[in-house]
Image (spheres, rainbow, N blue to C red):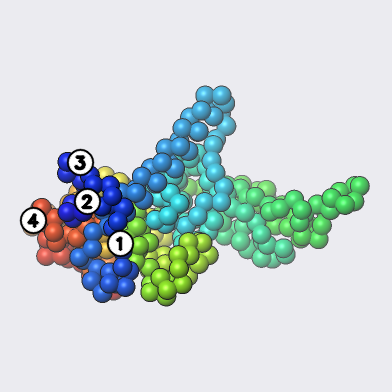
Amino acid sequence: MSSGQALPSGKPDWQQVAGLKFDPIAAQRDRTRWNFSPWADFRSYMDLSLARQLDQLRQAAHEADPRTPVGIEGTQMPHAFGGYDLWRLSQALDWVEPYDIGNAREIFGSFMPHKPIVTTVFETDTDHARRRLWHLLLEGDRGCIVWWSEDCIDWKREDYQLTAKAKALAPALKDMTSPLAKLFLKANPEYDPVYILYSQPASRWIGCLNPLSTVRRGLRRFSSYEAEHNQMAKARNGWLKVFQDLGFTPRFISSEQLAAELSSSRRPAVLVLPTAWALSDREIIAGIRAFLGAGQSRKPGHAVFSDVSPDCLTNMGSSASTMASPIPFRSQAQIRRR
């Protein structure tokens, strides 16, 4: 690792690894010379650990009760910290209740199209609750959680009367059981051929190089803070809103899905790489290049958009220019920068 390779050769010198230092200010000045492989290894391990543990718990629960779906509540935005690789989590869960931060709801919706997604209702008045629940129903939600019982039931009274908040929510919740709502529950979502890449390696890179204002204030990893200051979260949301404002319904696509679902597509399509500083060989060769085509196989109706110069780093956080077999990505893939 200390030699600059993604994997240690021979017996690693763990004392030397422990002594590695990171200067975020210097890294901001030159983003292609740093090797984040040890750090990326650790973050990848944490992502795998959480997803595998949840999958094991799900399997154990299904052995006891195969018919009951297993999921988790309160998932955070996509991030380098906390194990929140949303693609991996989506493969380990039967349902999920995501905090709608950093496009987590839209990402889970793309990755779990036939699995229940629910939301938590915090609203205290009828109109706001009704608007949000109808919006989420049209997005594909299958239920909601009312938070919390202390706000909805007067526990101090012997007859446990409903509170003013509960009475205000009642009409909105009744709407969700109406014949019209049941009709939408049977519908399947339709997406336009606009794909936004979800890349966890790029998330790790941004998680390490947050804006300088964040560095000076110390590490703040609350989703509420990251939603406003995380460069990738802001860029990803910007791309999503641009296409939605133009009347399109984009979907997110993972690195694992990229080659399998887009390489053979011939109809006009757009692939967006939000803040894709770090890309893997699989993403580039099997995914993006196959999507664009080359030579006589070039697909004229396909285009790739990026807000940065992609492929500065490998998926493990080392400089792409120092790879043993560097990939001349920018010279072959016609990237349109916006």
Comes first in the chain, label 2 or label 4? 2
Marks 3,4: beta carbons within 8 A: no
From the image, state whether disc 2 or disc 3 is nearer to you.
3
Give the distance between the C-alpha atoms of the residues marked 1 and 3, in whole angstroms.
Answer: 21 Å
Marks 1,3: beta carbons within 8 A: no
Residue 119: which disc? none
From the image, state whether disc 3 or disc 4 is nearer to you.
3
Q: Which one is in front, 139 or 85?
A: 85
Marks 2,4: beta carbons within 8 A: no
Residue 11: which disc? 3
Residue ID for mark 1: 21
What amino acid does circle 1 point to? Lys
Residue ID for mark 2: 1
Left or right for 133, reference 228: right
Give the distance between the C-alpha atoms of the residues marked 2 and 3, in whole angstroms.
Answer: 11 Å
- How many residues crowd mark 1 within 10 Å: few (<14), some (14–19), many (20+)? few
Look at 23% across and 59% down and name the residue there: 35
Comes first in the chain, label 1 or label 3? 3
Residue 296: which disc? 4
From the image, state whether disc 1 or disc 2 is nearer to you.
1
